[in-house]
């Protein structure tokens, strides 16, 4: 099974790995990777995988029986597809990844804020490189609500709150953490260790603003998110709203 290095350190842009196996002549499974596979509302990473003889574009990353890196030859590469045992270097498209990190952390802020201010629980989210959406259980937001949400989000960003992650035993998490925020009930029973992403208080003495179960990548401080603009809302069904936002 591929070692998911991005879970421990989301700042690494380049790494070495070994091909464990190839699949269908268009993808490889590595022994270790910093490429994030699509999941949890966050898109997959892209980038480059290279060997001493060739270079391939990483066009998709999906989690199956291991993490599959879908490859296409880079321009000018006519080398053989990397075989099992080959040492490769992976290089992430950092601008894309960093934008996903910023948007994903902003989504956590928004989810916590909506729960606190409107008792609106998040029901879904989708992060992109240049915008994000969040669905929540709420009847209807109005223009003054959106202005209020945007102002509070930018206050949280400016407070430069720390963002940290750690692994917790599931039984402990279910006993000690707020189930509305962690949404542990949505995870399969087979998952016994939970990765918790925590956004700190405004000062070290304050309780964390949010603790959420999440396997995505994040910035280490809310200040890195940048200015938030809430660009709109739409009704997505009975008692469900979608908020769209962008980052400067």
Image (cartoon, rainbow, N blue to C red):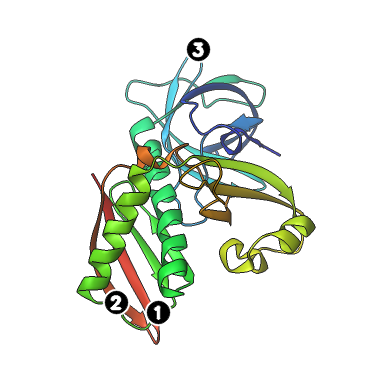
Which residue is situated farthest in the front direction here?
Answer: 205
Callouts 1 and 3 close, C-beta under 8 Å: no
- Distance (Cα) linking label 1 and label 2: 8 Å
Which residue is situated farthest in the bottom direction here?
Answer: 238
Residue 72 point in image, percent of width and height: 42, 34
Q: Quadrant of residue 153?
A: bottom left
Q: Which residue position is annotated with label 1?
A: 138
- Distance (Cα) linking label 2 and label 3: 55 Å
Callouts 2 and 3 close, C-beta under 8 Å: no
Q: Which residue position is annotated with label 3?
A: 52
Which callout, 1 or 3, points at the residue further toward the start of the chain? 3
Callouts 1 and 2 close, C-beta under 8 Å: yes
Q: Quadrant of residue 170?
A: bottom right
Q: Nearer the viewer, residue 180 or 65?
A: 180
Q: Is residue 16 above or below residue 184?
A: above
Q: Residue at x 47, y 68 (%)?
A: 115
Residue 46, numbered circle: none
- Distance (Cα) linking label 1 and label 3: 54 Å
Q: Which residue position is annotated with label 2?
A: 141
């Amino acid at each position: 099974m591929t070692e998911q290095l991005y879970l421990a350190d989301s700042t690494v842009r380049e790494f070495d790995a070994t091909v464990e196996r190839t699949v269908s002549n268009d993808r490889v499974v590595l022994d270790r990777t910093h490429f994030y596979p699509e999941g949890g509302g966050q898109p997959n990473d892209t980038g480059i995988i290279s060997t001493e003889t060739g270079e391939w574009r990483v066009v998709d990353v999906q989690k199956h029986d291991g993490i599959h890196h879908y490859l296409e030859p880079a321009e000018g590469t006519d080398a053989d597809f990397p075989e099992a045992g080959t040492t490769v270097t992976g290089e992430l498209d950092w601008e894309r990844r960093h934008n996903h990190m910023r948007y994903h952390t902003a989504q956590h802020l928004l989810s916590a804020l909506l729960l606190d201010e409107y008792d609106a629980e998040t029901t879904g989210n989708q992060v992109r490189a240049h915008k994000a959406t969040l669905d929540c259980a709420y009847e209807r937001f109005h223009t003054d609500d959106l202005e209020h949400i945007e102002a509070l989000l930018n206050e949280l960003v400016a407070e430069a709150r720390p963002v940290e992650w750690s692994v917790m035993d599931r039984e402990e998490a279910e006993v000690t953490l707020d189930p509305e925020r962690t949404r542990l009930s949505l995870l399969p029973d087979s998952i016994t260790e939970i990765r918790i992403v925590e956004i700190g208080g405004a000062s070290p003495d304050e309780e964390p603003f949010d603790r959420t179960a999440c396997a995505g990548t994040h910035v280490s401080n809310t200040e890195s998110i940048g200015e938030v603009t809430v660009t709109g809302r739409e009704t997505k069904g009975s008692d469900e709203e979608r908020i769209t936002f962008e980052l400067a």
